[in-house]
Image (cartoon, rainbow, N blue to C red):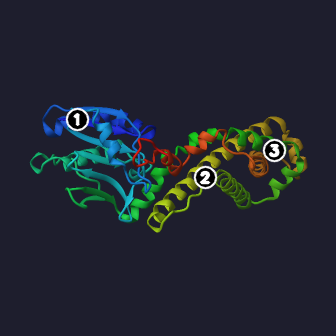
Amino acid sequence: MQVLLISDPGLPSRRISAVKDDFEGLLREDFDASAQVDTCVETLRVQPDHQLELSTLDAIVADYPDADLVIMFTGIPRHTQRKPLIAEVLPSRHVAVVSAPTLGALSTRRRLLKIFMSCINQMLPVGQVAQKHRLPRWGEWTSSGTAGRRTLHAHTFTGGPRLVSGMTMANEPLRMASKLSRALAAASATGAFGIFYSSIWQMSHHLSTLRLISIGMIAIAIMVVWLISINRLWDRPVNERLSQVVFYYNLSTVLTLLICVAALYACLVIGILAGSLVIIDPDFMAEIIGRPHARFTNYLDIAWLSAAMGVVAGALGSSFDDGADVKNLTHVQRLRPRVYVAGTDTAT
């Protein structure tokens, strides 16, 4: 048995590299035969309605004539029949397509291997099916359409949150946070004033913990709304059929930016806290805020409030460091270059 694993660039290809050897071992063990797994990294195109363009997949497979079975592991979030589509098997083509985001943010190696083995079983004749590896409880195969097409949908209740978390993880929000260096510089310059102005010390001392947390959350929310609006990251469905899919896209965009900005905010708090511990004398602070002694929590309150001020006053007006970063931020942005134009060999 010779299996070809095709993966999209980025996170899908890294996951394939991590499980390739284990997958090959499972094939040999379960089918008691020699097995070889080849891998390649290719970008799968889509049609204007975001359905897979299978002709481009056929062109990729044509370069591997010895492959008996093909699994395409794509970063495209798939959604049909109002449910997240985990995998689709086309027996006539000996091809299975697995969607990485529908597996969730923490798709373990075991889960991924179980899906791959299940796809292999679905592509083989009944007498050759291996029974050792069964599906997880959150999905089941069903027949769909003609030519023996089989689909594996996630359950409606758990599939949606798992899809959104998987899309958010695929956006790699912590990596994107590093692309906000201009915003971090502007916020740091503004937030640093909190170290030198005693009025900020007094205000942070008299504010309750709940109010300080609320101020920080509001600052993060304002920054997220600004980034979405200035970079036009909010998408609208072109028709009613795509409304639920676009809702998932927008929700994952919001969650991605929340993690980005929260990481930025945490960096600001840590930086300002370190600066205040070095610069502000404890006795002088105690005199200003009217306490016998200054505590560590007083320094933390100053850093928290100063970071909120820096995010709101300093980072607004900033954006990502490079336009290319914005184009790769969300799933919709990454899908646009994949759209296949009929009658040509180009994408738009």
Which numbered disc covers residue 258? 2
Residue 151 location, quadrant = bottom left
The amino acid marked with disc number 2 is Leu
In the rendered structure, are the residues bearing label 3 and label 1 in contact, judged by CB atoms less than 8 Å apart? no
How packed mark 1 is, by other alpha carbons closer than 10 Å (few <14, some 14-19, many 20 or more), is some
* Residue 125 horizontal/vertical position (percent): 12, 48
Say which residue appears at 41% left-offset and 36% top-offset.
14
The amino acid marked with disc number 3 is Thr
Q: Is residue 211 visible?
A: yes
* Residue 129 horizontal/vertical position (percent): 14, 47
Which numbered disc covers residue 67? 1
Left/right placement of residue 33 relative to residue 231 reads left
Q: Nearer the viewer, mark 2 or mark 1?
A: 1
* Residue 240 horizontal/vertical position (percent): 47, 68
Left/right placement of residue 281 relative to residue 111 reads right
- Whichever of callouts 3 and 1 sits on the residue coming sooner in the sequence is 1
In the rendered structure, are the residues bearing label 2 and label 1 in contact, judged by CB atoms less than 8 Å apart? no
Say which residue appears at 31% left-offset and 34% top-offset.
20
Left/right placement of residue 57 relative to residue 262 reads left
**Residue most extreme to the left:** 127
The residue carrying mark 3 is 190
Residue 282 location, quadrant = top right
The amino acid marked with disc number 1 is Ala
Q: Nearer the viewer, mark 3 or mark 1?
A: 1
- Whichever of callouts 2 and 3 sits on the residue coming sooner in the sequence is 3
Towards the viewer: 18 or 278? 18
Q: Secondary structure at mark 2?
A: helix
Q: Secondary structure at mark 1?
A: loop
Say which residue appears at 66% left-offset and 43% top-offset.
320
Towards the viewer: 205 or 158? 158
In the rendered structure, are the residues bearing label 2 and label 3 in contact, judged by CB atoms less than 8 Å apart? no
How packed mark 2 is, by other alpha carbons closer than 10 Å (few <14, some 14-19, many 20 or more), is many
